Image (tube, rainbow, N blue to C red):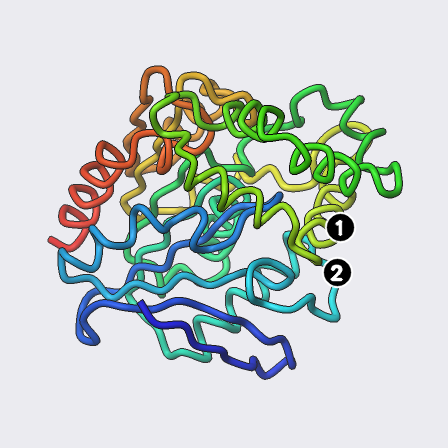
Amino acid sequence: MERSVVELPSGTTVSFLHGGLAEGSVVVLLHGGGVDHGLLSWGAAAPALIEAGYRVLIPDHPGYGESPMPEFAVTMVNLTDYLIEFINELGLSEIALVGVSMGGAMALSYTLAASDDVRSLVLVGSYGLQDKSPAHLLSFVLVRIPGLMWLQQRLITSSRWLLRRSVRQIIRHDASVTPALLDEVAAAARHPSSQRAFAQFQRDEIRLKGVRTNLTARLGEIGQPTLLVHGSRDIGVPVAAAGRAAQRLPDARLVVIEGAGHWTQRDVPEEFADLLLAHLAGARR
């Protein structure tokens, strides 16, 4: 894959990876929040897509990876606006949107705003499907303590044991938590702006009585073929929330991967790639 940079009409600068056949069907992979970035979420999935003949694009959201911090506050509304700009600026159409966690909610929000552009959806441990965050009241307090996220990341990256323990919260299969992956996560945790970006996002999202973005009531408006992939041991988004979403979406399939956590695409990469390719192939027919 190659890396390029695009400056959007609003002035936002976005770095993104791209590869595959220029004439291939377009797949846009959207990473999550926290210490995440495009390659960290999708480095294991992109090669299978490229080998299958797809054109793959992986943006680093503003403030994450190699995209600089934007002038706007990093909220779900503004992230959706940036994604609309990014897709329009690159002239993409008939796209498949694949999003994990925060990226899943972005994929849903984009589809609700610009449904004609979207051919199919894949939602991996998707945010935006529940009323509250885990331990909601505690989370509401913690995300408003200045510097807490910075301190947490410093502690995690200071100890290989703590780093591994942290990663094992979202990747449950021990064999998938490789030294190389731990090195990737440690490097991402030291990123200068992703902590700021995610802190802004959390403070905006986690309100006293619930989360700001819950798209469940609007899922009936999304007619695109949708695959929901969820780990049975996902502690961030309950499996029940994905089940309710699958019932509301007109054309949806839910696959619960037993024993997997929040990052199923890194937890069981081969099984995930098979599910992803099968769904995309079916959506093209």
**What is the crowding at mark 1: few (fewer than 14 residues within 10 Å), some, or many (at least 20)?**
some
Disc number at residue 6? none
Measure the C-alpha gap from mark 2 to mark 1: 7 Å
Q: Quadrant of residue 130?
A: top right
Vertically, is 87 above or below 256? below
- Amino acid under label 2? Ala
User: Residue beneath label 1, please?
Assistant: 200
Vertically, is 119 above or below 172? below
Q: Is residue 282 left or right of residue 14?
A: left
Quadrant of the drawing holding the N terminus: bottom left
**What is the crowding at mark 2: few (fewer than 14 residues within 10 Å), some, or many (at least 20)?**
some
Task: In the displayed orientation, state which residue is furthest to the left.
Answer: 285
- Amino acid under label 1? Gln
Front residue of this view, candidates 186 and 16: 186
The number of callouts visible is 2
Q: Residue at x 47, y 48 (%)?
A: 108
Disc number at residue 73? 2
Q: Quadrant of residue 260?
A: top left
Q: Residue at x 88, y 36 (%)?
A: 145
Q: Secondary structure at mark 1?
A: helix
Q: Residue at x 47, y 44 (%)?
A: 104
Q: Quadrant of residue 88?
A: bottom left
Residue 245 point in image, percent of width and height? 44, 30
Q: Secondary structure at mark 2?
A: loop
Residue 256 point in image, percent of width and height? 33, 22
Mark toward the start of the polypeptide (2 vs 1): 2
Q: Residue at x 43, y 33 (%)?
A: 263
* Disc 2 + disc 1, Cβ < 8 Å: yes
Residue 227 point in image, percent of width and height? 30, 38
Residue 147 point in image, percent of width and height? 85, 42
